[in-house]
Image: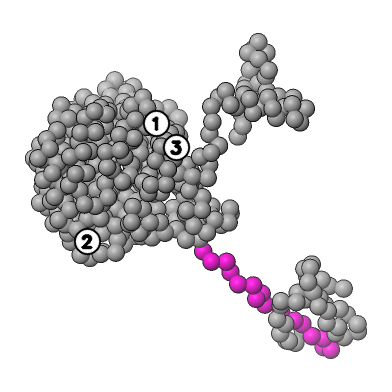
């Protein structure tokens, strides 16, 4: 007997009492097989499960997927922002603008890479990226004209203006009024740029000072009519403090993290720092794959604070840091992020990266039977606790299963000869 190995079958007898089994949901068709014999072709009738839904609605803004172009070079002009929309990005955050672009003077080279292996090696995967780039050096009038054009051409897509100003209430008010006139959907406030113009109380100079941050957020939210996201700097001891101040001062959401203050390295041939401009350099912002674990920790801290202190009040969280795969994005969402921003990843892989991100995120969702982003948002957040609680949980588990604790019992048990193996015995992944 020939069998298809399926649980529900019916039998059909043909020549010489030969029995062929078919699943009951199959539809057989006759076709000639040989003399005095008949062959059947089985056609599956099971319908395909629907594709997971990647769309998200954040602060009333509907996006086709959670992937957002982060503020920076990928959103620096009409041409590249249009390309982002055409490729399918869920939203675009333009490069940060201010009232007076004439004060913004960039240098080049302004990027430096860190590769796996020896620092400065031309081989190996890029794991870190430093930039000393400033905000947009294009006239505000030009950027506003392009915002308006984009909204006219893509009325159903989400365009977010990133803005930054000096410590001046009138300047902030004017800037907000002018960007809102273009029809943009939301505003992200750059409280986090780690380099350039701190003497003008711009960027991280505000985000690192909670009193200053509260005052400026008050100015902004008193007149803004669209959702406002406050972009957080990681260059603080406790990122929940400025995040809390921003939300209490009227912002609808927070975004984290911006780049980490860094020195990429020293060229061991020239003995000069990188990126090198006329033989000199300055500390800049660190991004790409190497910052991803740090960004996850900061987002987790903010998400825990938001959940415990603000509950279900509709505030949003946008995760940023080293996203190059759908799995990277899934981690941010599992920790409570509503959207995921990508900047350096686009600079390395191009705007078409969004198709890969969407495909991989769908694969993750299919694997776990998630039909929407909302179904797994924050799912991993409850599994973080204190070290003392971990000790208690493990002691209880050992007692319950009468098992031996994995790894060493005490620091006195370490040995010199077996140090590597002893270390590995306590690694979880």
Q: In front here: 242 or 284?
A: 242
- Mark 2 vs mark 3, foreground winner is 3
State left or right for residue 399 relative to residue 271. Answer: right
Residue found at x 22% / y 65%: 153
Mark 1, other Cα within 10 Å: few <14 / some 14–19 / many ≥20 = few
How many badges with numbers are in the image?
Answer: 3
Relative to 143, residue 113 above or below: above
Q: Where's residue 66, x and y in %?
A: 40, 53
- Mark 1 vs mark 2, foreground winner is 2
Residue interval drawn in magenta: 35-51
State left or right for residue 124 relative to residue 79. Answer: right
State left or right for residue 256 relative to residue 216. Answer: right
Q: Are marks 2 and 3 in contact (CB under 8 Å)?
A: no
Please state, as top left, top right, bottom left or bottom right, where the C terminus lies in the image.
top right
Q: Which mark is residue 121?
A: 1
Q: In front here: 254 or 329?
A: 254
- Mark 1 vs mark 3, foreground winner is 3
- For mark 2, what is the residue? 151
Question: From mark 1 to mark 3, how far is it between C-alphas?
Answer: 45 Å
Residue projecting furthest to the top: 412
């Amino acid at each position: 007997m020939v069998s298809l190995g399926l649980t529900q079958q019916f039998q059909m007898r043909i020549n010489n009492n030969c029995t062929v089994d078919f699943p009951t949901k199959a539809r057989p068709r006759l076709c000639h097989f040989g003399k005095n014999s008949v062959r059947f072709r089985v056609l599956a009738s099971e319908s395909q499960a629907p594709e997971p839904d990647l769309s998200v609605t954040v602060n009333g803004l509907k996006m086709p997927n959670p992937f957002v172009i982060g503020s920076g070079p990928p959103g620096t002009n009409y041409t590249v922002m249009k390309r982002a929309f055409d490729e399918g990005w869920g939203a675009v955050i333009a490069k940060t603008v201010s009232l007076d672009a004439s004060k913004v003077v960039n240098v080049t080279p302004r990027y430096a890479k860190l590769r796996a292996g020896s620092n400065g090696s031309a081989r190996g995967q890029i794991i870190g990226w430093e930039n000393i780039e400033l905000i947009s050096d294009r006239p505000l009038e030009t950027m506003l004209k392009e915002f308006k054009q984009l909204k006219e051409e893509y009325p159903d897509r989400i365009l977010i203006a990133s803005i930054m100003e000096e410590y001046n209430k009138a300047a902030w008010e004017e800037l907000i009024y002018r960007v809102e006139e273009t029809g943009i959907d939301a505003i992200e406030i750059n409280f986090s740029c780690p380099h350039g113009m701190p003497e003008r109380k711009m960027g991280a100079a505000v985000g690192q000072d909670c009193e200053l941050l509260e005052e400026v957020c008050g100015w902004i939210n008193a007149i803004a009519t669209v959702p406002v996201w406050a972009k957080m700097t990681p260059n603080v001891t406790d990122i929940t403090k400025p995040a809390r101040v921003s939300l209490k001062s009227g912002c609808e959401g927070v975004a984290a993290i911006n780049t980490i203050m860094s020195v990429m390295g020293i060229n061991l041939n020239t003995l000069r720092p990188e990126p090198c401009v006329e033989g000199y350099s300055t500390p800049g912002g660190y991004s790409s794959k190497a910052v991803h674990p740090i960004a996850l920790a900061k987002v987790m801290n903010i998400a825990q604070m938001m959940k415990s202190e603000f509950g279900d009040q509709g505030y949003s969280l946008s995760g940023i840091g080293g996203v190059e795969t759908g799995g990277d994005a899934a981690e941010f969402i599992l920790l409570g992020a509503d959207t995921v921003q990508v900047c350096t990843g686009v600079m390395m892989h191009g705007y078409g990266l969004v198709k890969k991100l969407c495909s991989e995120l769908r694969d993750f969702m299919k694997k776990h039977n998630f039909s929407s982003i909302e179904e797994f948002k924050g799912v991993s957040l409850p599994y973080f606790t204190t070290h003392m609680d971990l000790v208690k949980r493990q002691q209880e588990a050992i007692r319950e299963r009468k098992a031996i604790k994995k790894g060493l019992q005490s620091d006195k048990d370490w040995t010199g000869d077996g140090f590597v193996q002893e270390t590995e015995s306590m690694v979880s992944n």
